[in-house]
Image: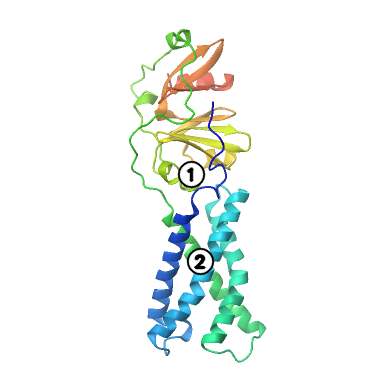
Amino acid sequence: MTGPAVHASPIAHPLRARALRGVMIGLAAALVLAVLGAMNTGQAPFGYRLLYWACVILPGSLLGIAIQTAVLAWGGLAGRRWTEIAVVAVLVSVPHTFMVIVATALFFGIDAITPGVVGFFGLTVLMVALVLTTINHLAAVPASEPVPAAAPKGAVSVPTEAAAAEFQPSSEPQAASTLSLPALPELIAEKLPVRLRSARLIAIAAEDHYLRIHTEAGSDLVLMRMTDACALLPETAGARVHRSWWAARGAAEGLMRHNGKAQLALRGGLIIPVSRAMQATLREQGWG
């Protein structure tokens, strides 16, 4: 039995870490802009322009966190990192441009808010939003080190002793079981709870509109399409062995048959179905 749909959507994993990261990056950007005296603010005292840039950048950072959360929850841009960055930056820059104009008028004064002024601030805000959104995405990359192995939540045990007797380990020199498990792609890892983000990937299973990500440290649900998830993974990392399953080649321990149906045994006791079309391919590639 699989677990309940806890953390099923991208917005369900803790927002605290994402918000804290966004605020810290925003403060760092405000400090850099204050030191540089960007946008002709260098004539003002350092403390005054630092306060100005903090009042300008931090609302944009919080707005970016909210918009990014909404975009992740929508899921329409899953697997298209740079498109997602561009969309978030544009959506942030539209309302944030007017925030910046108001802040600038309060701190330094503006003679008149003309279309040219709005256009100048709009382009500037868009460039800053692109940079900060990109930094936030890069800062969310999980560590590449694997965590100690643990039985994944929702793992399925071998169905019967008869099925176990039909276990067929591979005799190929580079058997699947000797390969290392792949790391989680960034766009999948950032949707998972923190405890799973640095774990190694074993399998991906489709459950309704969600995907259950099985790792060495456990499993959880994310809102993503199977085709988008498979597109993020190198072809050498594994294969889509069934319409509803992708398996890491390094996790494969052997092929078997149960009640006339082909199955693949994976690390941690997970047993998954294999489509008829994939059986010969997996045997030829040394999966077992």
Instruction: Look at the image and tell me whether residue 173 can be seen.
Output: yes
Query: Residue beneath label 1, please?
Result: 192
What element does badge 2 sit on? Answer: helix
What element does badge 1 sit on? Answer: loop
- Residue shown at 53% from the left, 43% from the top: 7
| Above or below for 30 versus 281 | below
N-term mark: 2 or 1: 2
Number of callouts: 2
Residue 183 image point, x, y percent: 41, 40
Look at label 1 and name its amino acid.
Leu
| Above or below for 99 versus 75 | below
Sort mark 1 into few (<14), some (14-19) or many (20+) by Cα contacts within 10 Å: many
Instruction: Look at the image and tell me whether residue 135 can be seen.
Output: no
Residue 28 image point, x, y percent: 40, 69
Sort mark 2 into few (<14), some (14-19) or many (20+) by Cα contacts within 10 Å: many
| Above or below for 85 versus 47 | above
Query: Residue beneath label 2, please?
Result: 61
- Residue shown at 39% from the left, 25% from the top: 176
CA distance separating discs 2 and 1: 22 Å
| Above or below for 238 versus 68 | above
Which corner quadrant holds the N terminus?
Answer: top right
Which corner quadrant holds the C terminus?
Answer: top left
